[in-house]
Image: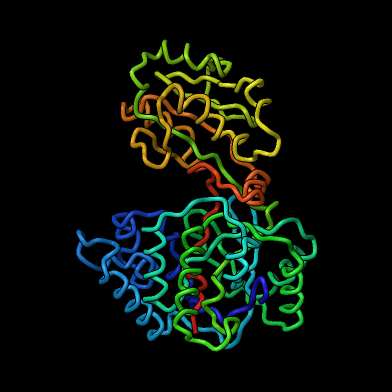
Amino acid sequence: MSLIKPFAGLRPLTERASEVAAPPYDVLSSAEARERAAGLPWSFLHISKAEIDLADDIDPYAPEVYARSAENLGSMIAAGVLVRDPSPRFYAYRMTMGEHVQTGLVAAASVADYETNRIRKHEFTRPDKEDDRVRQIEALNAQTGPVLLAYPDSANIDALIAAGSEGCAIADVVADGVRHTTWAITDETAIAAIGKAFDALPALYIADGHHRSAAAARVAAARRSRELVAAADENSAEHFLAVIFPAHEMRIMDYNRVVRDLNGLSPEAFLARIASNFSVTPSASRVTPEAPGIVGMYLGGKWYRLAINSALVERIQANDPVARLDVSLLSAHLLDPVLGITDLRRDKRIDFVGGIRGLAELERRVDSGEMAVAFAMHATRMADLMAVADSGEVMPPKSTWFEPKLADGLLSHVLD
């Protein structure tokens, strides 16, 4: 089975793309989605977060929500806002955010390769979130939320995708400060060359979309068990919607931490406690960590530069890609022993702030009295993510924040 396959995408008419494109379903609350979709009848939020068209107090996981999602998808197809391409193809997808540009490929990625870890993971998933995506896929008989993947360095693939991103775009939309541009790659020679180049890769890496890929695998397994098709490779459910970018073009931003209290310590006692594992230097300005091993800390209206004790880092085995991450070092040597935070997933005393919000958001959360202390992290590197995935390990929660985000609605994968 091929690592990736072309597919006949379901997409908005070019002239309607700006009306359809929407933020990813998992970056907005239901209330935010209602506000964003107000007056926009063709926004893809009516499909990805269909609770916005039902009572305000409805459970977003209620059966009626998935039914309304399917109804809304059908309405958009019937109105001619969404159309299905007549034949399988790949698509080029470019995101431009300020000076940052990344260009990748939209394809159907192999569930089998996901199951054998050739498409590699770095996060745990939650059953309830998987269940939600399974119900959405089954209700729509389509995958509408793409999984964000990365491929290792390949000048050949870069060139093939660059060639595919020439000519007339099928969508060109600016939303939330990001320009999203897509092209259809229909030339059979180009399609074959792209498929062959990807098949030569050792692995692909999930950057974002662990629940979407896990849900796709569950749907594929269920359909296999029901023997809906004679051969698995002929079943479109055996592949999932993915956008695959070169790892060297992807941008991970910092994912920062804020903590509600100092675990019974005074600010002075807290500073004294952390000095055993970190060098602590007051700063007259905000601290943006300039390198791994450096953390900015905001406490009591003041910024501090923390540098992890090098002896602690040296004790980490060279083959432990998780323990040497900055987020792991902060947890092991400050959050756990000093603040008593041992479970980042469940402890309500800690929260996480994506780097796109800036350091001013950390100051705001602390100055308001909501939080006692904030930590500004150095961004995790793609090489670190890939090393963790290659080792079969998982990263701590909230280790990566990718920007820019993919748009929902520009391309969907129908399960024939």
Left or right of residue 353, residue 113 in this image: right
Colour mode of the rendering: rainbow
The image position of residue 286, as x and y in percent, is 52, 25
Q: 164 or 254, which lies in front?
A: 254
Say which residue appears at 35% left-offset and 33% top-offset. Answer: 349
Q: Is residue 212 visible?
A: yes
Q: 349 or 280, which lies in front?
A: 349
> What is the total number of numbered labels drawn onto the structure image?
0
The image position of residue 226, as x and y in percent, is 44, 82
**Image: 277 above or below 392:** above
Residue furthest toward the right? 156
Q: Is residue 13 visible?
A: no
The N terminus - image quarter:
bottom right
Left or right of residue 249, residue 108 in this image: left
Residue furthest toward the front? 225
The image position of residue 216, as x and y in percent, is 49, 69
**Image: 296 above or below 125:** above
Say which residue appears at 46% left-offset and 27% top-offset. Answer: 335
Find residue 141 and report its image quarter: bottom left
Say which residue appears at 73% left-offset and 70% top-offset. Answer: 199
Find residue 381 and report its image quarter: top right
Find residue 254 and report its image quarter: top right
The image position of residue 223, as x and y in percent, is 46, 79
Left or right of residue 49, residue 2 in this image: right
Say which residue appears at 68% left-offset and 54% top-offset. Answer: 247
**Image: 163 above or below 315:** below
